[in-house]
Amino acid sequence: MAEGGDRAEQTPPPRPLDAIDRDILRILQTDGRASIRSVSERVHVSRANAYARINRLIDDGVIRGFSARVNHERAGQGASAYITLKIVQNSWRTVREQLQALPGAAHIALVSGDFDVLLLVHTSDNRTLRELVLTRLQSIPEVLSTRTLLVFEETDLDPGPGLGQVVAPSPDAEQL
């Protein structure tokens, strides 16, 4: 590769996850505040091994971060919507940057099908949602059209069995 090439997009190939890694992920998805001690006991490895594995999963980009699941209505964001966008061909990176800057944007996905982008937003009310769609989104030059799907009710799902065994949440609230 020539000097000055785009290296930001290069990532090492993913390492395979073993059963212990998958169990650690399951535990942390269920309880992101689980302590190293609790994780190590539940997957039957030493604390040092659990700590090293969690750090490797973070360094490898498998774990992208830790966060709280929010009840958006209780947090003053009573209006939620999925918005589909059709965009100018090859404008994804530009559009993504502009969507990330939108207040209330929670999830952005480049998808296939009848539209190009799926955007989830949470706003305080329908008036704010209307302003976001009609003023902010439709003023982005690369956005050709939008369709808004109001969310009447939503439920966050706990992690399913896809990563390994389901493990009961720990009563141990010690931080990592």
Image (spheres, rainbow, N blue to C red):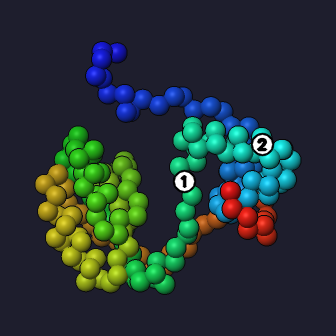
**Residue with the mark numbered 2:** 48
- Report x, y in % for residue 163: 69, 49
Q: Which residue: 51% across, 28% down?
A: 12
Residue type at mark 2 is: Ala
- Report x, y in % for residue 68: 56, 67
Q: Which residue: 27% across, 51% down?
A: 97
Q: Secondary structure at mark 2?
A: helix
Q: Residue furthest top?
A: 2
Whether residue 36 is situated above or below residue 105 in the rendered picture: above
In what quadrant of the picture does the C terminus appear?
A: bottom right
Image depth: mark 2 or mark 1 in front: 2
Q: Secondary structure at mark 1?
A: loop
**Residue with the mark numbered 1:** 65
- Report x, y in % for residue 124: 35, 82
In primary-sequence order, the first of circles 2 and 1 is 2
Q: Which residue: 64% across, 42% down?
A: 55
Q: Which residue: 30% across, 83% down?
A: 126
Of residue 110 and residue 64, the one placed in the foreground of this image is 64
Whether residue 73 is situated above or below residue 107 in the rendered picture: below
Residue type at mark 1 is: Gly
